[in-house]
Amino acid sequence: MANIFLTSKCNLKCPYCFADEFVNKGFEEITMENFKKVVEFIKPSQERIGLIGGEPLFHPLFGEFIDLLNADEAIKNVVIFTNGIELDRWIDKFNNEKFSFLINCNSESDIGHCQYERLKNNLLLMKDKIKNFNLGINIYSKDMDFYYIFDLLKLADKHNLRFSIALPNEKKEKSKNILKDFKEIQPKLFEFFDACIENNIVPNSDCNSIPDCLLSVEEKRTLLKLGILAEKNNMPKNTTINSFRTCNPVIDILPDLVAVRCFALSKYIKVPITQFKSLANLRSYFYNKVDLYARLSFVNKSCEDCNSRMMERCGVCFAHKLSKIEKLKKEVIKRA
């Protein structure tokens, strides 16, 4: 999957924002010319195209972008990542099954009463008019109240939920002791899992999981219960958690045609897509510059001989390994 960053403008200020380096940090939006260039760059790979921001629905040409994607039969799958508050403005545009939505849902205390009511109303609209959408939540604090999400899931008539442990960003610096940070948020995460089981909701994640080595026997039992729940709901067991999932380059392409491997690593490496013949070449570039070193690196001395890490089943975000990656690179260059 490759994502097109439409605009830096956003109507929210989420404390965990994964694109905090760019969002609301100056007005930046993609032109129609550059949008077409990115689409043509991604299209031959036949991968899903993601539309992201900021809040992508704020782009003044958003409707025209949708028309362009809608008319192109070579494009089969487009995912729109939104906070859901502006969906009512565009609801009639999405009459093609190629469009799907991931609606990142925040609590009323985080976004305010008016915006939360708009979100609720838009979920009702989506349920009536568009079936291909899912809700998401970010677990970002040991003190957060996540129970609102079950009311929204009921409202939208959904039984699965995308979740993530919030990635490092500008507001939350990358920790020097990520294992300690994971242990701090772990009770909240498993409180969330228990609530999912109680509400018959199957959670699925995509990146940045708690390493398997930190899990207690009881917590592993909880994950087994989630696997059983997934099977009962005709979903693959491995969608429940991502402890055993290898991180691969996503590719986020900015309005100026500069690409980052993912927003968690955006400050580390950027490169213009014009230097590459294809998306596959670009992904290989990031893999060789980041992934090869990240997979050999470890966040803590105790991780050095960890079997899960060596089998690429750790799940820790590569952003936590940046200093280790740089050190390993220098050692490799020195030996060469």
Image (cartoon, helix red, strand yellow):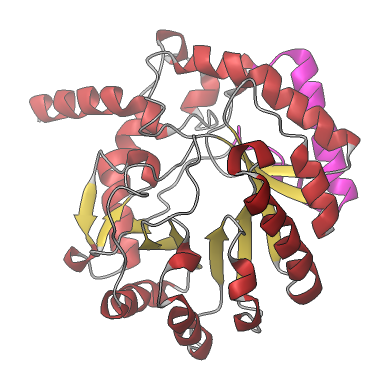
The reply to whether residue 1 is in sight is: no
Image quadrant assignment for residue 124: bottom right
Q: Give, as a single range, the part of the protein colored magenta.
A: 215-244
Q: Which residue is situated farthest in the front direction here?
A: 114
Q: Position of residue 55 (x, y in %)?
A: 47, 58
Q: Is residue 289 magenta?
A: no
Q: Position of residue 140 (x, y in %)?
A: 57, 30
* Residue drawn at x 75%, y 30% as measured from the top left: 192
For residue 85, above or below residue 18: below
* Residue drawn at x 41%, y 27% as measured from the top left: 172
Q: Is residue 334 left or right of residue 205?
A: left
* Residue drawn at x 45%, y 75% as measured from the top left: 62
The reply to whether residue 16 is in sight is: yes
Q: Position of residue 156 (x, y in %)?
A: 80, 58
Q: How many discs appear? A: 0
Q: Which residue is situated farthest in the top direction here?
A: 302
